[in-house]
Image (spheres, rainbow, N blue to C red):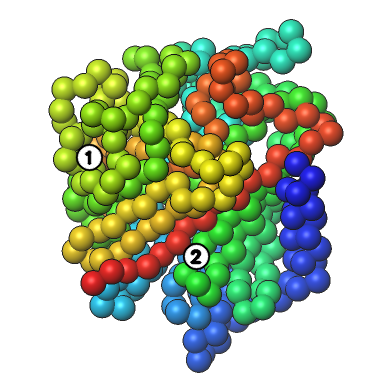
Amino acid sequence: MNKLLSRAFVLSVSFLLSFTACAKPSGGEASIVQSLYGTMPNGELVTQYVLTNTSGVEATIITYGGIITSLKTLDKNGKLGDIVLGYDNLEGYIADSNYFGALIGRYGNRIGKAQFSIEGKTYQLEVNDGENHLHGGFKGFDKKNWNATAFKIDGEVGLKMELFSPDGEQGYPGNVTAQVVYTLKSSNELVMDYMAITDKPTHINMTQHSYFNLAGDGSILDHQLTIPADSITPVDKGLIPTGALDKVENTPFDFRKATAVGKRIDVKNPQLAYGLGYDHNFVLNKSEEGAFELAAKVVEPKTGRVLEIFSEEPAIQFYSGNFLNGTAKGKGQTYEHRTGFCLEPQHFPDAPNQPNFASTLVKPSEVYSTRMSYRFSAVK
């Protein structure tokens, strides 16, 4: 905890000292371009920031939901292409129920029966997924307009996002101040540093919910996926963990070696039936608790694009776009079944109600802090 607090403090001081408003330069310099993206129904203005590094890799982020609306990376021929699903305007994101590109909080993933108890008191959360609570409720962090500050440090660019969540919001106790820092590095890596503090004990489990398609369009079933995980947390019909850990060996969930997403997605398996495909929490093989290590790797055979996800979190949720059904449209595409996938670093689903899972409880004396990143490359 002290190490994490120290890191957050250093980051905050650096932003204050080094913030630079940037216009997009020529000559391959890293840049930030700021513009108006749209206006919310309540009159709030939503700002867009386009972050570009020295290689031309480009991340576009809006203040609404902290959403990554576009992420352009290089393929094996050096051609840039957008690898995330998204909409064409703010109205699309406001109406969205898929969480395209959004920051998720206070709690990523599901909480069973939309409630938990802290110190003997039961808290009722919003019910927005069957009888359960999902991704912070109907108006979680993904539906809030964050405050943003752009910065440039040592030739690298980023965006500090801040949000205040009042006591009782979506049923959660405590006034929470959250911060997420996006940094686009010259090494073609988008780093996300999360921090939050509270004035009452509360549960926090933040993540990022981009949908990826490294080919740019079409099915994601040929993408080659590796997840260094020996176990998953099996779920019931409501996709709430049973509390057990199931080994992935000799099951469709074994991605310890690179395997096509679609190779086993339609085999008869109770867990796949519950999720209509993959929508499961993989327990990562960590060298030590909190180590910043590889959580997943994806290779797209045609373009050669590679996405590596690193994280301090103990688990990662793999979702194969099972509920995409053609109703969502954007970027000249119709997002059909399994045309995007999510890999969401996190603590375990329903951890507040599962005593055997690592705790997500944050106390007023503590600082919630975690780091995750997307690393981009290409192979011939």
- Label 2 sits on a secondary structure element that is strand
- Residue 337's disc is 1
Q: Answer above or below: position of 186 versus 313.
A: below
On the image, which quarter does residue 171 sit in?
top right
- Label 1 sits on a secondary structure element that is loop
In the rendered view of the protein, which quadrant contains the C terminus? bottom left
Q: Which residue is at the front of the view, 197 or 2?
A: 2
Tell how many labels. 2
For the residues carrying marks 1 and 2, which lies nearer the camera in this image?
2
Side (left or right) of 130 relative to 38: left
Amino acid at the residue labelled 2 = Glu
Horizontal and vertical percent for residue 131?
A: 46, 13
Q: Which residue is at the front of the view, 249 or 348?
A: 249
User: Which residue lies most toward the top here?
Assistant: 120
Residue at 56% of width from left, 18% of height from top? 356
Q: How far apart are marks 1 and 2 (CA)?
A: 29 Å
Disc 2 crowd, CA 10 A, few/some/many (<14, 14-19, 20+): some
User: Which residue lies most toward the bottom here?
Assistant: 27
Residue at image mark 2: 189
Q: Is mark 1 in CB contact (under 8 Å) with mark 2? A: no
Amino acid at the residue labelled 1 = His
Horizontal and vertical percent for residue 288?
A: 58, 41
